[in-house]
Amino acid sequence: MRKMVEITLGVLLGVAVGLLLGGLLYLSTRAPSAQKVELLPSSTPEPVSVYITGAVERPGVYQVPRNSRLVQVIAAAGGLREGADITQINLAQKVEDGQRIDIPGTGEFPTPQLVIGGKGLLVTPTLPPGGLVNINTADAALLETVPGIGPTIANRIIAYREANGPFQKVEDLLKVSGIGPKTLEKIKPYLTVE
């Protein structure tokens, strides 16, 4: 009888091991039944666009991160101008998309000439380093720093100057092919003949 019990236990143990191995084999070879999980990158909040005017260096439309404060928009606009009155504004105020902010100040602030800048935003053009560009001495690279003058117009200015001598006044640029009254009005504040 003892031998019979040993045989029965051996058979039961063999069946158990066989079932365990069969189950492991089945689990490792079957196709997964769950749906594929795809991890997506976290979304970055879209920036907001704010129009700032008044007593700032470069009025215009600026994109700043969502939840930005007014002080960050002022920094993007080049800082405050002399005469800015910050007692009337809250520098810690959160800005909203589409908001217009006028920084008050003492004195008059001329209406800026705004141009389309990066990302299609309106910005006040920055004067070239060193102030006004002399159209009688500037090379093409320096002329191209002026908003409204590209490589073609820069080369035409130089060619005209070499063929006809120095310009007597900035308005003489109207004699250059491709420069009309509208273009001259746009580029004139950045140019000199002295």
Image (tube, helix red, strand yellow):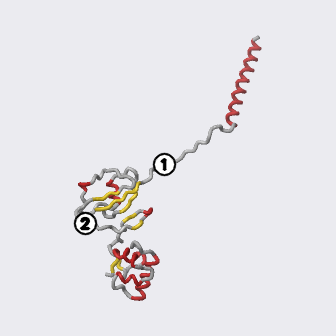
Q: Amino acid at mark 2?
A: Glu
Residue 59: mark in rendering:
none
Q: Are marks 2 and 1 in contact (CB under 8 Å)?
A: no
Task: Tell me where residue 185 sits by quadrant.
Answer: bottom left
Distance CA(mark 2)–CA(mark 1)? 43 Å
Mark 1 surroundings: few (<14), some (14-19) or many (≥20) residues within 10 A:
few
> Please, is residue 186 above or below residue 121 in the view?
below
Residue placed most toward the observer, 80 or 59:
59
Mark 2 surroundings: few (<14), some (14-19) or many (≥20) residues within 10 A:
few
Residue 108: mark in rendering:
2
Where disc 2 sits, the SS reads loop
Residue placed most toward the observer, 151 or 105:
105
Q: Residue at x 35, y 70 (%)?
A: 127
Farthest residue, direction bottom: 164
Q: Amino acid at mark 1?
A: Ser
Q: Position of residue 126 (x, y in %)?
A: 36, 68
Q: Which residue is mark 1?
A: 43
Residue placed most toward the observer, 33 or 18:
33
Q: Is residue 163 left or right of residue 130?
A: right
Q: Residue at x 33, y 64 (%)?
A: 58
Q: Position of residue 33 (x, y in %)?
A: 65, 37
